[in-house]
Amino acid sequence: MNLKMVQVINQSVCDGIAGRRPNATPKGVVIHNDAGSIYATAAQYVNGLAVMSPTQLANGFAHYYIDRNTIARVEDTFNAAWHTANPEGNLNYVGYEVCQSMGASDADFLANEQMTFKQVAEDMKFWGMHPNRDTVRLHKEFVPTACPHRSWELHGKETNAVKDYFISQIKKYMGNPNEGNDNSSNNNQNNIKGGETTMQCLYERPINSKTGKLEWNGDAWTVMFCNGVNTRRVSHPDEMKVIEDLYKKNNGKDIPFYGQDKWNKNAPWYNRLEAMFPVVK
């Protein structure tokens, strides 16, 4: 799988229709199998969802649709999504659809899974979340359903067997593949350091106060979070508090913060940081 050729689509085509999640950080993730059109790609899901009516969207959608070539986010992860047919799952968990579960070969479907695990790992690192049986869930844990039917057949045909496989693969992309499987978020092992944190920091950078766009000569400031993989805008004070609290809990010290007093318009070195760790939504 050539990760360099992956297309990333960030289009919030569902437009927050399911409402805002109650907390800045979700309780965990749900990895689905799409069971849709036999060869539907992630990009095709974006196009299809973009023209759906509210009534059609009410039939269900996840935050992400992923295949081996494309990672598509169709709803902001701070919003809910109708992906589990259950209020707890919809409001508190971020949903990832592994595409082509009905038509792809085993090799292609497994590659689609791997791309999904990579995105889940990136998001869990951003949230400071530890993958275990409480934070990595199956659709069928919320309601009676065959989902994730293809993963179920390939990875053990039993809830914990499938979850443990998912967890092991997510950890691989988080950089801690040899860590033991934690079966509960109450396990003391959950307090150990998670992924790489040496490049994590918070910083301020200029924005245009009228448009909200990031601009080097903007007339206002916003806070950004670099997680060592990419950079995201901190859109709410609660999100910043969660990042600061989790970083301190995991590392025993405050996360580095670079305020606007560190910059000047002749030497905006945050541009260098964002060149290495691109800004994503």
Image (spheres, rainbow, N blue to C red):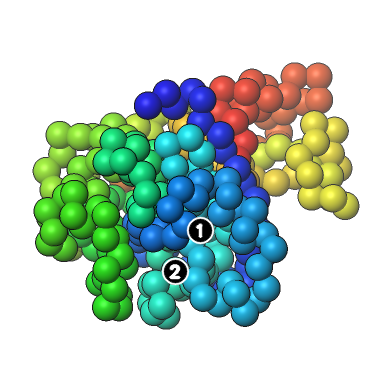
N-terminal-most mark, 2 or 1: 1
- Which residue sits at x=41%, y=58%? 34
Vertical order, 177 against 73 (above or below): above
Q: Quadrant of residue 114?
A: top left
For disc 1, the neighbor class at 10 Å (few under 14, some 14 to 19, many from 20) is many
Residue 159, can we see it? yes
Query: In the rendered view, would you say 101 is above or below 175?
Result: below
Looking at the picture, how far across and down is residue 51, in whole percent?
69, 63
Residue in front for this viewpoint, 234 or 147: 147
Q: Secondary structure beneath disc 1?
A: loop
Q: Is residue 97 above or below residue 80?
A: above
Amino acid carrying label 1: it is His
Q: Which residue is mark 2?
A: 83
Does residue 181 appear left or right of residue 169 in this picture? left
Residue at position x 34%, y 32% in the image = 196
Image point 44% across, 69% down: which residue? 83
Q: Position of residue 187 (x, y in %)?
A: 14, 58
217 to the left or right of 171: right
SS for dot 2? loop
Judging depth in this view, the residue of 266 and 105 nearest the camera is: 105
Q: Position of residue 101 (x, y in %)?
A: 35, 52
Disc 1: which residue: 63
